[in-house]
Image (cartoon, coloured by chain):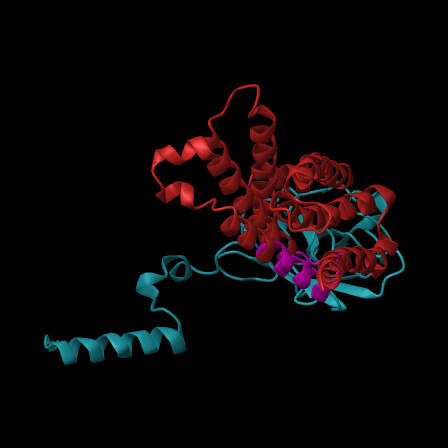
Chain colours: A cyan, B red
């Protein structure tokens, strides 16, 4: 039988050891039920759908480019990469507002579930340099993302999707 | 030399306001904003500048504008502040309606939005209280305490709102303006014994 010390020193030592394990190796599965069932789906972010335009066209590049939006799309639970998934991207850039149609464009993921679309430089708007991405087709549940740039001088931004069957 | 003191006070106050507005007016971000968004942003900068004037006018600190005159100007600046906030919010609404709706409903992803909205309502309430004070014969104790509490909310929330935003204001001039706003409000409230109302017994009402 496992012997558990019940002295104060013993409990403190055990607690510290557990804490150190969680910090260095992540929480054990018993306190992470979502992970235990596989890859958790990405939830929509607050404000992610703002100024979304359904059915924005698939484009080679938004405007004159110079900035890269990229990411991956995977399936929830097993994490399999999803090819041919349509992702819409839009932002307030050097070439237009989020509300402008020409600020929007869509692209498809490749065989590895990776998407990458060139667009104009994102600039701070409404107090924060941020982009918008949407998955909004029938096969999976809709997800709207609104990643924020670490620095408004960044030349790229990444956002990953984990989609859940509709 | 009293004239030097007067000149220094005006130089600091006017300097902080003019430099803040000038830096915002030359921001590179303006190149990618239409006129409505530019005006909306400027109204916000101007509102912060007016918030600096308010405690100085209320307490009569500005040379040439002692208490009776300063208070009259304070009322006009208060009205201008309310107008600036309305232009700020309306302009942002026209620029990106869903972002402003989210902010007003406290459902915005940006942490500074909620601070701005609280500051806005507090400023409206402070102005409304001032406007209704005579018609409703609001008791002096309630009036002073209410106006002081609302004003503290305006200043603290407004400053946090401004500091968290990456916008047209320069970071140094913004920090200086915010520090002056907080300092001026604190000194004026202390000087006008706004907090004494919380501790002093009622009879003081007669002297207010």
Q: Nearer the viewer, residue B143 or A86?
A: B143
Whether residue B21 can be seen here: yes
Q: What secondary structure prevails in the magenta region?
A: helix
> In the rendered image of this protein, does residue B99 appear above or below residue A93?
above
Q: From the viewer's perspective, tell me whether residue B146 is left or right of residue A34.
A: right
* Residue located 74% across and 56% down the image: B10
Where residue A9 sits in the image (x, y, percent)?
15, 80
Where residue B119 sits in the image (x, y, percent)?
58, 43
Q: Is residue A57 magenta?
A: no
Q: From the viewer's perspective, tell me whether residue B30 is left or right of residue B190.
A: right
Whether residue A44 can be seen here: no
Residue that lies at the very extreme toward the top in this rendered image: B135
Q: Nearer the viewer, residue B142 or B95?
A: B142
Q: From the viewer's perspective, tell me whether residue B9 is left or right of residue A36.
A: right
> In the rendered image of this protein, does residue B88 appear above or below residue A85?
above
Q: Quadrant of residue A14?
A: bottom left
Residue that lies at the very extreme toward the front in this rendered image: B1
Where residue B130 sits in the image (x, y, percent)?
59, 30
Q: Quadrant of residue B199?
A: top left
* Residue located 75% across and 52% down the image: A91
Where residue B164 sits in the image (x, y, percent)?
62, 57
Q: Is residue B164 magenta?
A: yes
Magenta segment: B163-182
* Residue located 66% across and 63% down the image: B175
Q: Nearer the viewer, residue B39 or B22?
A: B22
Q: Quadrant of the N terminus of chain B?
A: bottom right
């Amino acid at each position: 039988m496992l012997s558990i010390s019940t002295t104060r020193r013993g409990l403190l030592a055990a607690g510290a050891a557990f804490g150190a394990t969680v910090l260095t190796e992540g929480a054990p599965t018993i306190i992470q039920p979502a992970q235990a069932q596989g890859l958790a789906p990405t939830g929509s972010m607050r404000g992610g759908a703002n100024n979304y335009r359904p059915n924005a066209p698939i484009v080679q590049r938004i405007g004159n480019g110079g900035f890269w939006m990229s990411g991956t799309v995977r399936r929830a639970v097993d994490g399999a990469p999803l090819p041919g998934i349509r992702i819409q991207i839009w932002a307030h850039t050097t070439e237009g507002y989020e509300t402008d149609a020409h600020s929007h464009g869509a692209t498809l993921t490749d065989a590895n579930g990776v998407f990458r679309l060139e667009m104009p430089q994102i600039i701070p708007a409404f107090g924060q340099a941020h982009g918008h991405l949407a998955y909004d087709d029938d096969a999976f549940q809709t997800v709207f993302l609104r990643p924020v740039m670490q620095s408004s001088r960044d030349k790229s931004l990444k956002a990953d999707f984990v989609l859940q069957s509709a | 030399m009293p004239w030097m003191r007067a000149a220094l006070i005006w130089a600091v106050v006017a300097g902080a306001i003019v430099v803040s507005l000038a830096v915002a007016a030359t921001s590179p971000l303006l190149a990618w904003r239409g006129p409505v968004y530019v005006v909306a942003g400027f109204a916000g900068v101007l509102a912060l500048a007016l918030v600096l004037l308010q405690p100085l006018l209320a307490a009569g600190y500005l040379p040439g504008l002692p208490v009776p005159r300063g208070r009259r100007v304070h009322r006009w600046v208060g009205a201008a502040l309310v107008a600036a906030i309305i232009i700020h919010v309306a302009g942002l609404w026209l620029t990106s309606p869903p972002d402003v709706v989210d902010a007003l409903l406290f459902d915005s992803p940006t942490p500074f939005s909620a601070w701005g909205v609280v500051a806005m309502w507090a400023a409206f309430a402070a102005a409304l209280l001032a406007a209704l004070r005579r018609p409703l014969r609001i008791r002096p104790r309630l009036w002073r305490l209410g106006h002081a509490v609302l004003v503290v909310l305006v200043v603290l929330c407004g400053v946090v709102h401004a500091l968290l935003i990456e916008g047209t204001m320069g970071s140094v001039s913004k920090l200086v303006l915010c520090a002056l706003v907080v300092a001026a409000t604190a000194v004026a409230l202390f000087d006008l014994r706004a907090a004494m109302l919380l501790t002093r017994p009622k009879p003081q009402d007669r002297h207010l």
